[in-house]
């Protein structure tokens, strides 16, 4: 189980990120600089393995939320620099929750409960169908409206299983 942390804000800069001196991987890694609106800045390392929800193309000026593993080591520098696992470009009328969901499909922070419907698409990150029950897994839940209860309840458009 990954302990997901997140950052969100507006992308202010996109640049190449060099991972070796011999040029190996050149152009494959990117550094996104994100400002949170209160003066805080975060750098996110984007690798070929970073999952972009809806395969969204991100550019300067876009509002995003990035998710990383809080248990992974990070360099002690300012601004903080995280290896992004998942990037969500904000879209109107769409909410996204990335978290571990238990057997009852409740998030680990107890803020969202998922109710499945026959129309809920359940996919792997590669787009293929996931045929098992999605409980007790790390999930990316894409949904619209939710109740105002605690936990909020929703019937998602799509669930992406993060294996």
Image (tube, rainbow, N blue to C red):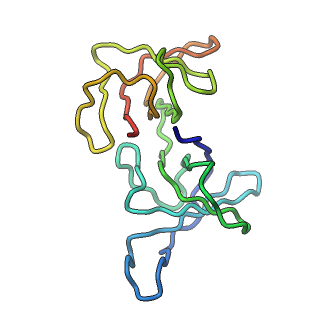
What residue do we see at 62% from left, 21% from top?
110
| Residue 163 at x, y percent in the picture | 38, 40
**In the rendered image of this protein, does residue 139 appear above or below residue 7?**
above
**In the rendered image of this protein, does residue 130 appear above or below residue 75?**
above
Q: Nearer the viewer, residue 123 or 93?
A: 123
The outermost residue toward the bottom is 22
Task: Give the left or right position of residue 147, taking residue 137 as reference.
Answer: right
Task: Give the left or right position of residue 110, taking residue 14 as reference.
Answer: right
| Residue 71 at x, y percent in the picture | 62, 49
The outermost residue toward the right is 38
Task: Give the left or right position of residue 108, taking residue 19 as reference.
Answer: right
Count of marks, rendered view? 0
Q: Nearer the viewer, residue 118 or 76?
A: 76
**In the rendered image of this protein, does residue 55 appear above or below residue 61?**
above
What residue do we see at 38% from left, 29% from top?
159
Among the 4 quarters of the image, the one containing residue 107: top right
Task: Give the left or right position of residue 65, taking residue 133 as reference.
Answer: right
| Residue 68 at x, y percent in the picture | 56, 50
Q: Which of 14 and 102 is in front in this view?
A: 102
What residue do we see at 47% from left, 87% from top?
21
| Residue 56 at x, y percent in the picture | 38, 49
């Amino acid at each position: 189980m990954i302990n997901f942390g997140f950052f969100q804000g507006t992308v202010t800069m996109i640049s190449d990120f060099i991972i070796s001196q011999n040029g190996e991987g050149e152009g494959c890694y990117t550094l996104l600089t994100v400002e949170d609106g209160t003066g805080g800045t975060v750098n996110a390392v984007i690798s070929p393995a970073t999952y972009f929800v809806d395969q969204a193309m991100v550019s300067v000026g876009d509002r995003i939320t990035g998710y990383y593993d809080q248990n992974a080591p990070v360099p002690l520098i300012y601004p903080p620099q995280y290896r992004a696992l998942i990037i969500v470009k904000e879209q109107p009328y769409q909410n996204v929750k990335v978290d571990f969901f238990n057997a009852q499909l409740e998030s680990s922070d107890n803020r969202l409960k998922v109710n499945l419907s026959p129309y809920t698409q359940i996919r792997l990150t590669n787009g293929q169908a996931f045929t098992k029950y999605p409980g007790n897994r790390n999930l990316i839940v894409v949904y619209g409206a939710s109740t105002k209860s605690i936990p909020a309840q929703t019937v998602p458009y799509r669930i992406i299983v993060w294996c």
